[in-house]
Image (cartoon, rainbow, N blue to C red):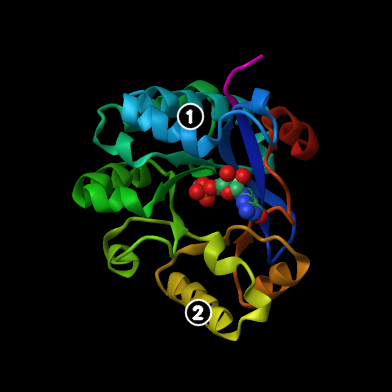
Amino acid sequence: GNRLAVFLQPIFDLQAGGVVAAESLARWPAGGASGGISPADFVAFAEQSGLIGALTHWSIDATLRHAAQLPPAAGMKFSINLSPRVFDQPGLVEKLTGALEIWGIAPERVVAEVTETALVNDLEQTVRVLRRLRDRGLGVAIDDFGTGYASIAYLRKFPATELKIDISLVRGLEADARGAALMRAIIDMAHHLDLVTVAEGIEDPATRTLLARMGCDFGQGHHLGEPMPAGDFITRFGA
Ligand code: G
Ligand code: MN
């Protein structure tokens, strides 16, 4: 029917090979690929109308319900996007840890993705919440790295475990010597900070090969796998 659904996009281990994780993305499937309401639009609407807390809670529950269908031994990790707006709402940490218990998922298998704009709004409050998530064993990813401002300064304070490098820095990499040098520097910088690197928006085999050679840990993008209905993901990678 016309309702919100969880899609999962595979995340590859660029060094060892294989799908090791997935990013959870909310979709309105009735719209299909072309029509319907885009995630950017309904997330913005939810943020403006005060429904973002409800959307986030739904996303956490729906994602972990699917995650629970995979054998824990598979070690598949799940990344969930957290809107900047949820960090000043009470109960976020309790909601996440409660859902982990209900679905029997180890906290180490879940990564909270946060965009840099969240840090700009209220850095201290965001850091406090993320620190609590880290203390409970969850991972924290800086999403869309390279698109915000003051990113480097935030890296100093932010209790992250991974850096997701934005598609704008990944696209056209193999034809761009300057872009490639920048990418190498970002990957090295991240590793010095004990952050694993995830390249977003890998759209061709050349880019995948280049990023692997640069030491990038993980990759995501249409070349490696499109976002798919969560049930399809579980069927495909559940063995
Ligand atoms: O902001 P965030 O990185 O969470 O957004 C992920 C979005 O990027 C999703 O909507 C997803 O469908 C899209 N996406 C994933 N892989 C690719 C890709 O290879 N190319 C492009 N253009 N978009 C992608
Ligand atoms: Mn994301």
How many C-alpha atoms fall within 10 Å of the one at disc 2: few (<14), some, or many (≥20)?
Answer: some
Q: Nearer the viewer, residue 146 or 24?
A: 146
User: Mark number for residue 60?
Assistant: 1
Q: Nearer the viewer, residue 19 or 85?
A: 85
**In the displayed structure, does residue 202 sit left or right of residue 58?**
right
Residue 4 painted magenta = yes
**In the displayed structure, does residue 11 sit left or right of residue 159?**
right
Magenta residues (range): 1-5
Seen in the picture, residue 189 relative to 98 is either above or below; the reply is: below
Q: Is residue 106 visible?
A: no
Seen in the picture, residue 107 relative to 140 is either above or below; the reply is: above
Check mark 2 vs ligand 1: CB closer than 8 Å? yes or no: no
Q: Amino acid at mark 1?
A: Ile
Residue receiving disc 2: 182
Report the predominant secondary structure element of the magenta stretch: loop
Q: Amino acid at mark 2?
A: Leu
Which residue is at a point 77% across and 66% down the rendered structure image? 205
**In the displayed structure, does residue 179 sit left or right of residue 162?**
right
